[in-house]
Amino acid sequence: MAERSWSFSKAFRSIFSGPELITDETWDDLETALITADFGPDVAESILEEIRAEVERHRVTEVKEMRRMLRDAIEERLAAYDPTLRLSERPAVILVVGVNGVGKTTTIGKFANYLRAFDKKILVGAADTFRAAAVEQLATWAERAGVDIVKPQQQGQDPASVAFQTVQRAIDEGYEIVIIDTAGRLQTKGGLMDELGKVRRVVEKLAPVSEVLLVLDATTGQNGLAQAEAFIEHAGVTGLVLTKLDGSAKGGFVLAVQQTTGLPIKLVGQGEGISDLTGFTPHVFAQQLVG
Ligand SMILES: Nc1nc2c(ncn2[C@@H]2O[C@H](COP(=O)(O)OP(=O)(O)OP(=O)(O)O)[C@@H](O)[C@H]2O)c(=O)[nH]1
């Protein structure tokens, strides 16, 4: 399996290339590796305790066994959240929210491309009318992904009306999945949340909202989470998308973010290319993380 930059198997390599038997130093190294990878002190502590107990119970002496236990402990915690996207409605409407620059537009392009592989007819809506460039950027991604787009008729058009027109067209023309881009910044947080609420209410006149995906930049760690708090509190978020994991050495954030928000990660972005987005599979992720 290809090594990822966020993989902390690098930190582990020193443990595994050292003595094959578990020593005090192994425990110190493990703790350091967990903290360095941004698991957060609570998660790191609970994983360490669990592994210590298991090592004692089964009288484990080999580092190799400890690695397997670590992988299992992480997988079990990741799998406590359901990563399944709910897309069975027709049309299935997905709102994509998050602060500016986290990778919303890029994610929509990659996501549209990903869904097209399942032969779905997809329409994207450019309801981030706050910035003209945002509309053009989304249009470029839609073209790359080979999907259709609904754009505002004039700059600054009410985002809710663009969202409404998008869903209306999807119903009229038989699109199966609708992905709507929203603004990440307004003058005030309250204004932004009001705008998102309006987008939602207007869409729901036509179709239920299947998913509200909050995009988070993995390189910003806990800081990014604080910035996204208003969305978590007010936007009815159903799942998270973690972007820029390729640029992050902090894979443990993945687990920390689920535990802190109580929300499942549903998609993971690992690059700027159109195919650099995948679903989230706890088993695969734990494997990549631990090596
Ligand atoms: N390395 C890497 N870069 C990414 C990833 N996702 C997005 N980016 C980059 O992050 C930058 C911002 O992405 P955008 O999609 O414009 O972010 P946005 O949230 O839509 O930003 P606004 O349109 O300003 O609201 C771009 O340069 C993207 O190429 C990722 O998974 N990995």
Image (tube, grey):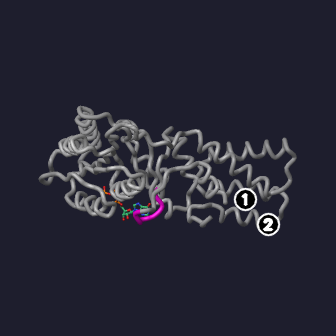
Q: Position of residue 87 (x, y in %)?
A: 40, 41
Q: Residue 210, how many percent across, how many down?
A: 37, 38
Q: Which mark is residue 47?
A: none
Front disc: 2 or 1? 2
The quarter of the displayed image where residue 239 is located: top left
Up the image or down, 277 lies above or below 240; here it is below
Residue at figure coordinates x 68%, y 42% from the top left: 46
Is label 2 in contact with label 1 (beta carbons under 8 Å)?
yes
Q: Which amino acid does label 1 sit on?
A: Asp
Find numbered disc 2 in the image and state the secondary structure of the residue it sits on. loop
Q: Does label 2 or label 1 sit earlier along the sequence?
A: 2
Answer whether residue 268 is visible to the viewer in this image: yes
Q: In this view, does 191 lie to the left or right of 95?
A: left
**Region of the chain picked out in magenta, as a range:** 269-274
Of residues 64 and 217, the one drawn nearer to the viewer in this rendering:
64
Label 1: which residue? 29
Residue that label 2 marks: 18
**Classed neighbour count for the residue bearing mark 2: other residues with Cα under 10 Å, few (<14), some (14–19), many (≥20):** few
Residue 102 shows in this picture: no
User: Looking at the image, which residue is at 19% across and 58% down?
Assistant: 132
Relative depth, front residue between 49 and 280:
280
Quadrant in the picture for residue 134:
bottom left
Whole-percent x, y for residue 101 in the image: 35, 58
Quarter of the figure that contains the N terminus? bottom right
In the displayed image of the protein, which residue is found farthest to the left? Answer: 154
Residue 233 percent coordinates (x, y):
39, 36
Indicate whether residue 262 is drawn in magenta: no
Distance of label 2 from label 1 (alpha carbons): 11 Å
